[in-house]
Amino acid sequence: GFKQNRLAYTLALLSKETGGKLDLLYFWEKQSVPEPVMEYLLCLSDVVHDHITDLPTGVSLVPEWCKKEDCWKSLKAKKIRCRPPPEIKELTQTKRKGAKPRKSAGDEAIEWCVTRGSQAWMDLSSFLKQRNLMGGKQRSQAFNMGRTIGNDRTPSDKLSIPCKKIWEDATTMYDWSPDQETD
């Protein structure tokens, strides 16, 4: 029983034991788990099962115990007898070539917007305003992006994601380009 609790805690413990750097995409790409890694996972799962079913006084249900922070804290504090196999080191993101943590969509949008430069955003804002294109909100966002970058501040992802779309829409729908003269 308690499959969901056991699985959730086993994955969390695996992440803790490997420093959160295990490249899970590797398992998806290979569509298999190396036998020594599987044995390690099963060992961790047994530790988790023993822990979550050893209920403290006053707690009568495993799912109830698993929801308490003390359950996780006490598991983390235990000396885990399972030893990670040497193969684990080869499956960490720092060891596998090209397995770098992926940037979030927000981080990618921020980087994309910043590389365009402050002046290009100001030009885009003017272009849209002079031709009454898009909405006032979009024109304002483009202006704010230019101002933020111009003040040597990093824009938020909440501004960068829509601004990237505004830029892309302006170039495809209105044939705008950053080196274009504004009237």
Image (cartoon, grey):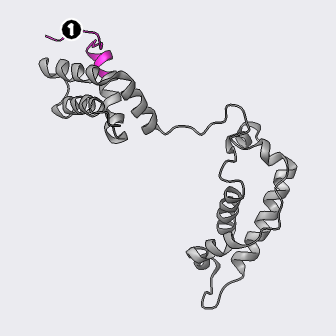
**Where is residue 169 shown, x and y percent of the image?**
31, 22
The residue indicated by pointer 1 is 181
Q: Could you classify mark 1 by the number of other residues whose Cα lies within 10 Å: few (under 14), some (14-19), or many (20 or more)?
A: few
Q: Residue at x 72, y 44 (%)?
A: 92
Q: Position of residue 98 (x, y in %)?
A: 67, 31
- Nearer the observer, 166 or 60: 166
Say which quarter of the image contains residue 11: bottom right
Query: Outermost residue toward the bottom?
Result: 57
Query: As drawn, is 135 to the left or to the right of 145?
Result: left
Q: Quadrant of the N terminus?
A: bottom right
Task: Please determine whether, in this image, residue 109 is positioned above or below residue 128.
Answer: below
Query: From which residue to which does the magenta span run?
Result: 169-183
Give the camera-side residue of 4 and 76: 76
Q: Quadrant of residue 112?
A: top left
Q: Residue at x 29, y 10 (%)?
A: 179
Main secondary structure found in the magenta portion: loop
Image location of residue 20, percent across then percent down: 65, 52
Number of marks present in the image shown: 1
Q: Is residue 61 left or right of residue 149?
A: right
| Residue 178 falls within the magenta-colored stretch | yes
- Where residue 182 sits, quadrant-wise, is top left
